[in-house]
Amino acid sequence: MLTAAVVALTAVAVALSLPWWLPGRVVALRVRLFARINGDEGIPVPGETVGVDRFLEVYSHPAAGGRSEGAVLSDLFWYWLAPGPHVHQEHLEAGERYDAVARATRGFLSVPRADAEELTRRSVAAALDGVGRGGTVRLRDLMMPVWAAFYYELVFGEPCPREARDLIVGNADDVVTALKCCGLRHMDRRHRLTRYLAGRLDDVRRPLPEGLSDEERSFYLQGTFFNTAVVQMSEAMAHLLMVLARHPETQEQARTGDDRVLDQVMAETMRLYPLFGVAHRITTGDIEVDERTTIPAGSVLCFNYPEFHHAGIEEPDRFDPGRFAPSRRREGGAAPHHIPFGVAANRPCPAWRLAPITMRVAVREVLRRYALATSASHTRSLPNRGPCLLVPRTPPAAGRAHRAALPAMWARDRFEDVWRSLVQLVLGTRMVRDARRQRLCARHFHPERF
Protein backbone atom coordinates (compact mmCIF):
# COMPACT_ATOMS: atom_id res chain seq x y z
CA MET A 1 0.00 0.00 0.00
CA LEU A 2 2.82 2.37 0.96
CA THR A 3 4.72 1.55 -2.22
CA ALA A 4 1.67 2.30 -4.36
CA ALA A 5 1.22 5.63 -2.60
CA VAL A 6 4.87 6.54 -3.19
CA VAL A 7 4.57 5.64 -6.87
CA ALA A 8 1.41 7.71 -7.18
CA LEU A 9 2.98 10.70 -5.45
CA THR A 10 6.08 10.40 -7.61
CA ALA A 11 3.95 10.32 -10.78
CA VAL A 12 2.05 13.41 -9.62
CA ALA A 13 5.30 15.20 -8.81
CA VAL A 14 6.75 14.38 -12.24
CA ALA A 15 3.56 15.52 -13.96
CA LEU A 16 3.55 18.80 -12.04
CA SER A 17 7.20 19.39 -12.90
CA LEU A 18 6.73 18.98 -16.65
CA PRO A 19 6.12 22.66 -17.46
CA TRP A 20 9.47 23.62 -15.95
CA TRP A 21 11.70 21.30 -17.99
CA LEU A 22 9.93 19.49 -20.83
CA PRO A 23 9.03 22.38 -23.22
CA GLY A 24 12.60 23.68 -23.37
CA ARG A 25 13.99 20.25 -24.16
CA VAL A 26 11.36 19.61 -26.81
CA VAL A 27 12.10 22.96 -28.46
CA ALA A 28 15.83 22.13 -28.51
CA LEU A 29 15.04 18.78 -30.10
CA ARG A 30 12.83 20.46 -32.69
CA VAL A 31 15.62 22.88 -33.61
CA ARG A 32 18.04 19.99 -34.10
CA LEU A 33 15.56 18.06 -36.23
CA PHE A 34 14.82 21.09 -38.41
CA ALA A 35 18.54 21.68 -38.92
CA ARG A 36 19.06 18.04 -39.85
CA ILE A 37 16.21 18.05 -42.37
CA ASN A 38 17.14 21.41 -43.93
CA GLY A 39 20.86 20.80 -43.90
CA ASP A 40 23.69 22.97 -42.65
CA GLU A 41 22.83 26.19 -44.43
CA GLY A 42 23.37 29.78 -43.46
CA ILE A 43 25.93 32.14 -41.94
CA PRO A 44 24.59 33.49 -38.62
CA VAL A 45 24.75 37.27 -38.33
CA PRO A 46 25.92 38.40 -35.82
CA GLY A 47 28.36 35.55 -35.41
CA GLU A 48 31.97 34.57 -35.98
CA THR A 49 32.04 35.80 -39.58
CA VAL A 50 30.15 39.07 -39.02
CA GLY A 51 30.18 40.69 -35.59
CA VAL A 52 27.58 42.99 -34.10
CA ASP A 53 29.63 46.01 -35.16
CA ARG A 54 29.36 45.02 -38.85
CA PHE A 55 25.73 43.81 -38.75
CA LEU A 56 24.19 46.93 -40.28
CA GLU A 57 26.97 47.31 -42.82
CA VAL A 58 26.45 43.77 -44.14
CA TYR A 59 22.65 43.98 -43.85
CA SER A 60 22.69 47.17 -45.94
CA HIS A 61 25.17 45.89 -48.54
CA PRO A 62 23.76 45.89 -52.11
CA ALA A 63 24.87 42.28 -52.52
CA ALA A 64 22.85 41.16 -49.46
CA GLY A 65 19.53 41.61 -51.25
CA GLY A 66 18.74 38.17 -52.63
CA ARG A 67 15.39 37.02 -51.28
CA SER A 68 14.52 33.48 -52.33
CA GLU A 69 16.54 31.87 -55.09
CA GLY A 70 19.35 29.66 -53.88
CA ALA A 71 18.31 28.99 -50.28
CA VAL A 72 16.84 25.77 -48.95
CA LEU A 73 15.13 27.85 -46.27
CA SER A 74 13.11 29.56 -48.99
CA ASP A 75 11.26 26.32 -49.73
CA LEU A 76 10.03 26.30 -46.14
CA PHE A 77 8.87 29.92 -46.10
CA TRP A 78 7.21 29.61 -49.49
CA TYR A 79 5.38 26.56 -48.15
CA TRP A 80 4.10 28.47 -45.14
CA LEU A 81 3.12 31.59 -47.13
CA ALA A 82 1.40 29.83 -50.03
CA PRO A 83 -0.55 30.48 -52.16
CA GLY A 84 1.35 32.88 -54.37
CA PRO A 85 4.69 33.24 -52.57
CA HIS A 86 6.31 34.02 -55.93
CA VAL A 87 4.59 37.45 -55.90
CA HIS A 88 4.92 38.07 -52.17
CA GLN A 89 6.70 41.40 -51.74
CA GLU A 90 9.03 40.02 -49.07
CA HIS A 91 10.27 37.22 -51.34
CA LEU A 92 10.43 38.81 -54.78
CA GLU A 93 13.88 39.24 -56.26
CA ALA A 94 14.96 42.73 -57.29
CA GLY A 95 13.70 43.82 -60.70
CA GLU A 96 10.74 45.29 -62.54
CA ARG A 97 8.21 42.96 -60.90
CA TYR A 98 9.37 43.85 -57.41
CA ASP A 99 9.36 47.57 -58.29
CA ALA A 100 5.78 47.35 -59.54
CA VAL A 101 4.62 45.49 -56.44
CA ALA A 102 6.43 47.85 -54.05
CA ARG A 103 5.01 50.89 -55.85
CA ALA A 104 1.47 49.53 -55.56
CA THR A 105 1.92 48.79 -51.85
CA ARG A 106 3.17 52.31 -51.16
CA GLY A 107 0.10 53.64 -52.91
CA PHE A 108 -2.31 51.69 -50.72
CA LEU A 109 -0.44 52.65 -47.54
CA SER A 110 -0.28 56.36 -48.38
CA VAL A 111 -3.20 57.32 -46.16
CA PRO A 112 -3.60 60.71 -44.46
CA ARG A 113 -2.86 60.38 -40.78
CA ALA A 114 -6.29 61.56 -39.65
CA ASP A 115 -8.01 59.02 -41.92
CA ALA A 116 -5.79 56.18 -40.67
CA GLU A 117 -6.49 57.11 -37.05
CA GLU A 118 -10.24 57.27 -37.57
CA LEU A 119 -10.29 53.96 -39.42
CA THR A 120 -8.30 52.37 -36.60
CA ARG A 121 -10.72 53.69 -33.96
CA ARG A 122 -13.71 52.29 -35.81
CA SER A 123 -12.04 48.93 -36.39
CA VAL A 124 -10.97 48.54 -32.75
CA ALA A 125 -14.31 49.73 -31.40
CA ALA A 126 -16.18 47.19 -33.51
CA ALA A 127 -13.98 44.35 -32.24
CA LEU A 128 -14.25 45.44 -28.59
CA ASP A 129 -18.03 45.83 -28.82
CA GLY A 130 -18.13 42.08 -29.33
CA VAL A 131 -16.16 41.51 -26.12
CA GLY A 132 -18.62 43.37 -23.93
CA ARG A 133 -17.88 42.91 -20.22
CA GLY A 134 -14.40 41.62 -20.84
CA GLY A 135 -12.94 38.46 -19.38
CA THR A 136 -10.20 36.18 -20.65
CA VAL A 137 -9.15 36.62 -24.28
CA ARG A 138 -6.26 35.66 -26.53
CA LEU A 139 -4.88 38.99 -27.67
CA ARG A 140 -3.80 37.83 -31.11
CA ASP A 141 -7.30 36.49 -31.74
CA LEU A 142 -8.81 39.75 -30.45
CA MET A 143 -6.67 41.83 -32.78
CA MET A 144 -7.09 39.86 -36.00
CA PRO A 145 -10.62 41.11 -36.79
CA VAL A 146 -9.37 44.65 -36.11
CA TRP A 147 -6.70 44.53 -38.78
CA ALA A 148 -8.82 42.45 -41.15
CA ALA A 149 -11.37 45.27 -41.14
CA PHE A 150 -8.69 47.97 -41.31
CA TYR A 151 -6.83 46.58 -44.30
CA TYR A 152 -9.98 45.55 -46.12
CA GLU A 153 -11.19 49.15 -46.03
CA LEU A 154 -7.71 50.36 -46.95
CA VAL A 155 -7.80 48.16 -50.07
CA PHE A 156 -11.45 48.42 -51.09
CA GLY A 157 -12.48 51.79 -49.66
CA GLU A 158 -15.60 50.47 -47.94
CA PRO A 159 -16.48 48.88 -44.57
CA CYS A 160 -15.55 45.21 -44.28
CA PRO A 161 -18.54 42.85 -44.51
CA ARG A 162 -18.76 39.90 -42.11
CA GLU A 163 -18.11 37.37 -44.90
CA ALA A 164 -14.86 39.03 -45.95
CA ARG A 165 -13.70 39.51 -42.36
CA ASP A 166 -14.20 35.82 -41.60
CA LEU A 167 -12.30 34.80 -44.74
CA ILE A 168 -9.41 37.14 -43.93
CA VAL A 169 -9.18 36.08 -40.30
CA GLY A 170 -9.39 32.40 -41.24
CA ASN A 171 -6.59 32.84 -43.78
CA ALA A 172 -4.31 34.90 -41.49
CA ASP A 173 -4.84 32.61 -38.52
CA ASP A 174 -4.00 29.56 -40.62
CA VAL A 175 -0.79 31.17 -41.87
CA VAL A 176 0.52 32.22 -38.46
CA THR A 177 -0.57 28.98 -36.77
CA ALA A 178 1.40 26.98 -39.33
CA LEU A 179 4.39 29.32 -39.07
CA LYS A 180 4.53 28.64 -35.34
CA CYS A 181 4.08 24.90 -35.96
CA CYS A 182 0.98 24.87 -33.73
CA GLY A 183 -1.15 23.45 -36.54
CA LEU A 184 -0.90 22.18 -40.10
CA ARG A 185 -1.67 24.54 -42.96
CA HIS A 186 -5.14 24.26 -44.53
CA MET A 187 -4.98 25.36 -48.14
CA ASP A 188 -8.76 25.19 -48.55
CA ARG A 189 -9.13 28.12 -46.10
CA ARG A 190 -6.53 30.09 -48.00
CA HIS A 191 -7.97 29.32 -51.43
CA ARG A 192 -11.40 30.55 -50.34
CA LEU A 193 -9.92 33.99 -49.74
CA THR A 194 -8.04 33.85 -53.05
CA ARG A 195 -11.29 33.18 -54.91
CA TYR A 196 -13.03 36.00 -53.07
CA LEU A 197 -10.28 38.47 -53.95
CA ALA A 198 -10.26 37.31 -57.58
CA GLY A 199 -13.88 38.43 -57.81
CA ARG A 200 -13.12 41.85 -56.33
CA LEU A 201 -10.13 42.99 -58.40
CA ASP A 202 -12.18 45.68 -60.13
CA ASP A 203 -13.24 47.14 -56.78
CA VAL A 204 -9.86 48.09 -55.29
CA ARG A 205 -9.34 51.79 -54.65
CA ARG A 206 -5.76 51.98 -55.98
CA PRO A 207 -3.98 50.61 -59.07
CA LEU A 208 -2.75 47.04 -58.72
CA PRO A 209 0.80 46.07 -59.78
CA GLU A 210 1.47 46.17 -63.49
CA GLY A 211 2.72 43.07 -65.26
CA LEU A 212 0.84 40.57 -63.09
CA SER A 213 -1.93 38.23 -64.19
CA ASP A 214 -5.31 38.48 -62.46
CA GLU A 215 -4.46 35.40 -60.41
CA GLU A 216 -1.15 36.95 -59.35
CA ARG A 217 -2.91 40.19 -58.41
CA SER A 218 -5.18 38.19 -56.14
CA PHE A 219 -2.12 36.55 -54.63
CA TYR A 220 -0.53 39.98 -54.22
CA LEU A 221 -3.49 41.32 -52.24
CA GLN A 222 -3.69 38.17 -50.17
CA GLY A 223 0.02 37.96 -49.36
CA THR A 224 0.75 41.63 -48.76
CA PHE A 225 -2.34 42.81 -46.90
CA PHE A 226 -4.31 39.80 -45.69
CA ASN A 227 -1.36 37.59 -44.75
CA THR A 228 1.57 39.80 -43.77
CA ALA A 229 -0.20 43.00 -42.69
CA VAL A 230 -2.95 41.31 -40.67
CA VAL A 231 -0.60 38.76 -39.08
CA GLN A 232 2.20 41.21 -38.25
CA MET A 233 -0.07 43.90 -36.86
CA SER A 234 -1.99 41.37 -34.77
CA GLU A 235 1.24 39.96 -33.40
CA ALA A 236 2.69 43.43 -32.73
CA MET A 237 -0.42 44.52 -30.86
CA ALA A 238 -0.54 41.27 -28.88
CA HIS A 239 3.06 41.84 -27.75
CA LEU A 240 2.37 45.46 -26.84
CA LEU A 241 -0.78 44.68 -24.87
CA MET A 242 0.91 41.74 -23.12
CA VAL A 243 3.72 44.05 -22.02
CA LEU A 244 1.22 46.53 -20.63
CA ALA A 245 -0.71 43.75 -18.90
CA ARG A 246 2.48 42.58 -17.16
CA HIS A 247 3.51 46.11 -16.09
CA PRO A 248 0.52 47.92 -14.50
CA GLU A 249 2.45 51.13 -13.80
CA THR A 250 3.58 51.36 -17.39
CA GLN A 251 0.03 50.60 -18.49
CA GLU A 252 -1.28 53.57 -16.52
CA GLN A 253 1.44 55.83 -17.90
CA ALA A 254 0.59 54.73 -21.43
CA ARG A 255 -3.10 55.38 -20.79
CA THR A 256 -2.72 58.85 -19.30
CA GLY A 257 0.57 60.06 -20.77
CA ASP A 258 1.28 61.64 -24.13
CA ASP A 259 2.41 59.90 -27.28
CA ARG A 260 6.07 60.20 -26.32
CA VAL A 261 5.55 57.86 -23.38
CA LEU A 262 3.66 55.37 -25.50
CA ASP A 263 6.30 55.57 -28.23
CA GLN A 264 8.99 54.59 -25.74
CA VAL A 265 6.91 51.61 -24.62
CA MET A 266 6.37 50.57 -28.23
CA ALA A 267 10.07 50.89 -29.04
CA GLU A 268 11.12 48.79 -26.04
CA THR A 269 8.45 46.19 -26.83
CA MET A 270 9.72 45.83 -30.39
CA ARG A 271 13.28 45.63 -29.09
CA LEU A 272 12.43 42.76 -26.78
CA TYR A 273 9.94 41.04 -29.09
CA PRO A 274 10.88 41.75 -32.73
CA LEU A 275 8.36 40.30 -35.15
CA PHE A 276 11.11 38.61 -37.14
CA GLY A 277 13.35 36.11 -35.40
CA VAL A 278 15.80 35.30 -38.17
CA ALA A 279 15.57 36.73 -41.69
CA HIS A 280 17.58 35.00 -44.39
CA ARG A 281 19.09 36.77 -47.40
CA ILE A 282 21.09 35.33 -50.30
CA THR A 283 24.18 37.20 -51.45
CA THR A 284 24.16 38.16 -55.12
CA GLY A 285 27.87 39.05 -55.11
CA ASP A 286 30.90 38.86 -52.86
CA ILE A 287 30.81 40.92 -49.65
CA GLU A 288 34.14 41.94 -48.15
CA VAL A 289 33.73 42.00 -44.38
CA ASP A 290 37.34 42.90 -43.60
CA GLU A 291 40.82 42.34 -45.01
CA ARG A 292 40.75 38.65 -44.14
CA THR A 293 37.07 37.75 -44.59
CA THR A 294 34.95 37.75 -47.74
CA ILE A 295 31.47 36.29 -47.94
CA PRO A 296 31.17 34.68 -51.38
CA ALA A 297 28.23 35.14 -53.73
CA GLY A 298 25.47 32.60 -53.22
CA SER A 299 25.89 32.50 -49.43
CA VAL A 300 22.84 32.46 -47.19
CA LEU A 301 23.01 35.09 -44.46
CA CYS A 302 20.75 34.54 -41.43
CA PHE A 303 20.22 37.89 -39.69
CA ASN A 304 19.23 37.37 -36.06
CA TYR A 305 17.07 40.32 -34.96
CA PRO A 306 16.68 39.36 -31.26
CA GLU A 307 20.42 38.87 -30.79
CA PHE A 308 21.19 42.19 -32.50
CA HIS A 309 18.59 44.02 -30.39
CA HIS A 310 20.08 42.59 -27.20
CA ALA A 311 23.66 43.51 -27.98
CA GLY A 312 25.49 46.40 -26.34
CA ILE A 313 23.15 47.18 -23.44
CA GLU A 314 22.99 46.28 -19.77
CA GLU A 315 20.30 43.82 -18.68
CA PRO A 316 19.04 43.30 -22.24
CA ASP A 317 16.19 41.02 -21.11
CA ARG A 318 14.74 43.62 -18.74
CA PHE A 319 11.77 45.69 -19.92
CA ASP A 320 12.81 49.33 -19.66
CA PRO A 321 11.04 51.88 -21.90
CA GLY A 322 13.30 54.56 -20.45
CA ARG A 323 16.05 53.28 -22.74
CA PHE A 324 14.36 55.33 -25.46
CA ALA A 325 13.82 58.51 -23.44
CA PRO A 326 15.52 61.56 -25.03
CA SER A 327 17.73 62.06 -21.95
CA ARG A 328 19.04 58.48 -22.14
CA ARG A 329 19.69 58.91 -25.85
CA ARG A 330 21.78 62.02 -25.19
CA GLU A 331 23.73 60.23 -22.47
CA GLY A 332 24.36 57.24 -24.71
CA GLY A 333 22.29 54.89 -22.55
CA ALA A 334 19.70 54.01 -25.16
CA ALA A 335 19.59 50.72 -27.03
CA PRO A 336 22.22 51.18 -29.77
CA HIS A 337 20.93 48.39 -32.00
CA HIS A 338 17.28 48.74 -32.88
CA ILE A 339 15.79 48.03 -36.32
CA PRO A 340 12.16 46.99 -35.73
CA PHE A 341 11.23 47.90 -39.31
CA GLY A 342 14.48 46.85 -40.99
CA VAL A 343 16.85 49.32 -42.65
CA ALA A 344 16.27 51.77 -45.47
CA ALA A 345 19.00 50.24 -47.64
CA ASN A 346 17.45 46.76 -47.68
CA ARG A 347 13.68 46.95 -48.11
CA PRO A 348 12.36 48.28 -44.82
CA CYS A 349 8.83 47.32 -43.82
CA PRO A 350 6.53 49.31 -46.14
CA ALA A 351 4.29 50.10 -43.14
CA TRP A 352 7.11 51.70 -41.10
CA ARG A 353 5.19 55.00 -41.05
CA LEU A 354 1.62 53.72 -40.81
CA ALA A 355 2.09 50.96 -38.23
CA PRO A 356 3.12 53.15 -35.23
CA ILE A 357 0.32 55.63 -35.97
CA THR A 358 -2.35 52.96 -35.97
CA MET A 359 -0.87 51.06 -33.01
CA ARG A 360 -1.03 54.19 -30.82
CA VAL A 361 -4.71 54.62 -31.57
CA ALA A 362 -5.47 50.94 -31.04
CA VAL A 363 -3.73 50.87 -27.64
CA ARG A 364 -5.54 53.96 -26.43
CA GLU A 365 -8.91 52.59 -27.53
CA VAL A 366 -8.29 49.32 -25.66
CA LEU A 367 -7.02 51.05 -22.50
CA ARG A 368 -9.92 53.49 -22.53
CA ARG A 369 -12.30 50.58 -22.01
CA TYR A 370 -10.26 48.00 -20.12
CA ALA A 371 -7.46 47.47 -17.66
CA LEU A 372 -5.23 44.59 -18.71
CA ALA A 373 -3.83 41.81 -16.55
CA THR A 374 -2.07 38.55 -17.33
CA SER A 375 -0.17 35.79 -15.58
CA ALA A 376 0.68 33.95 -18.82
CA SER A 377 4.19 33.63 -20.22
CA HIS A 378 5.35 36.13 -22.81
CA THR A 379 7.89 35.03 -25.42
CA ARG A 380 8.91 36.46 -28.77
CA SER A 381 7.19 33.72 -30.78
CA LEU A 382 4.01 34.02 -28.66
CA PRO A 383 2.63 30.55 -29.47
CA ASN A 384 0.04 30.91 -26.68
CA ARG A 385 -1.54 33.84 -28.60
CA GLY A 386 -1.34 36.14 -25.58
CA PRO A 387 -3.79 35.09 -22.84
CA CYS A 388 -5.01 38.22 -21.05
CA LEU A 389 -7.78 39.50 -18.81
CA LEU A 390 -9.75 42.49 -20.00
CA VAL A 391 -11.09 44.15 -16.85
CA PRO A 392 -13.80 46.79 -17.46
CA ARG A 393 -12.83 50.16 -16.05
CA THR A 394 -16.40 50.77 -14.88
CA PRO A 395 -17.58 49.84 -12.35
CA PRO A 396 -14.18 49.53 -10.60
CA ALA A 397 -15.38 46.69 -8.36
CA ALA A 398 -15.80 44.47 -11.41
CA GLY A 399 -12.04 44.02 -11.56
CA ARG A 400 -11.79 41.96 -8.39
CA ALA A 401 -13.83 39.06 -9.74
CA HIS A 402 -11.89 39.00 -12.99
CA ARG A 403 -8.48 39.05 -11.30
CA ALA A 404 -9.36 35.94 -9.36
CA ALA A 405 -8.93 34.11 -12.67
CA LEU A 406 -5.21 34.94 -12.88
CA PRO A 407 -3.96 31.89 -10.92
CA ALA A 408 -6.02 29.61 -13.17
CA MET A 409 -4.62 31.37 -16.24
CA TRP A 410 -1.08 30.83 -14.96
CA ALA A 411 -1.62 27.10 -14.39
CA ARG A 412 -3.39 26.58 -17.69
CA ASP A 413 -0.70 28.41 -19.62
CA ARG A 414 2.10 26.37 -18.07
CA PHE A 415 0.48 23.03 -18.82
CA GLU A 416 -0.64 24.11 -22.30
CA ASP A 417 3.02 24.81 -22.98
CA VAL A 418 3.83 21.14 -22.36
CA TRP A 419 1.25 19.90 -24.85
CA ARG A 420 1.98 22.67 -27.33
CA SER A 421 5.71 21.92 -27.42
CA LEU A 422 4.97 18.31 -28.35
CA VAL A 423 2.49 19.40 -31.01
CA GLN A 424 5.05 21.80 -32.46
CA LEU A 425 7.65 19.04 -32.58
CA VAL A 426 5.40 16.60 -34.45
CA LEU A 427 3.63 19.03 -36.78
CA GLY A 428 6.70 21.16 -37.38
CA THR A 429 8.75 18.15 -38.41
CA ARG A 430 5.97 17.01 -40.72
CA MET A 431 5.68 20.41 -42.41
CA VAL A 432 9.44 20.83 -42.81
CA ARG A 433 9.65 17.44 -44.49
CA ASP A 434 6.66 18.24 -46.70
CA ALA A 435 8.19 21.57 -47.70
CA ARG A 436 11.42 19.80 -48.63
CA ARG A 437 9.41 17.34 -50.71
CA GLN A 438 7.41 19.99 -52.59
CA ARG A 439 10.37 22.38 -53.14
CA LEU A 440 8.04 25.25 -54.11
CA CYS A 441 10.81 27.84 -54.43
CA ALA A 442 13.30 25.60 -56.19
CA ARG A 443 10.64 24.42 -58.66
CA HIS A 444 9.67 28.01 -59.44
CA PHE A 445 13.21 29.12 -60.29
CA HIS A 446 14.45 25.84 -61.84
CA PRO A 447 11.45 23.88 -63.17
CA GLU A 448 13.71 21.97 -65.55
CA ARG A 449 15.26 20.12 -62.64
CA PHE A 450 12.00 18.55 -61.53
Image (spheres, rainbow, N blue to C red):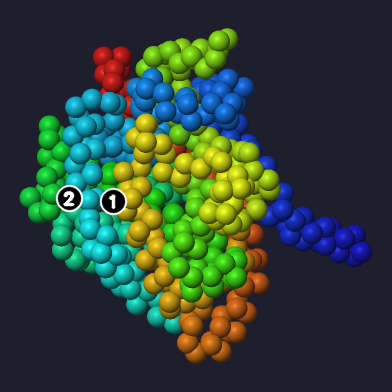
Rendered position, 282 above or below 173: above
Q: Is residue 332 left or right of residue 345?
A: right
Position above or below: 215 against 377:
above
Q: Amino acid at mark 2?
A: Leu
Q: Are marks 1 and 2 in contact (CB under 8 Å)?
A: yes
Query: For the residue marked with disc 1, what is the amino acid?
Result: Phe
The x, y position of residue 246, in whole percent, is 59, 65
Residue placed most toward the observer, 161 or 423 = 161
With 173 as the anchor, is 122 left or right in this view? left
Residue sitting farthest toward the top: 292
Residue beneath label 1, please?
A: 226
Q: Give SS at disc 1.
A: helix
Q: Does residue 229 appear in the picture of this structure?
A: yes
Residue 306 visible in the displayed image:
no
Which dot marks residue 197?
A: 2
Q: Give percent across and percent down for residue 384.
A: 53, 57
Decide which of 430, 247 is in the foreground and name it.
Answer: 247
Report the Cα–Cα distance between label 1 and label 2: 10 Å
| Residue under the point 60% across and 84% down | 400
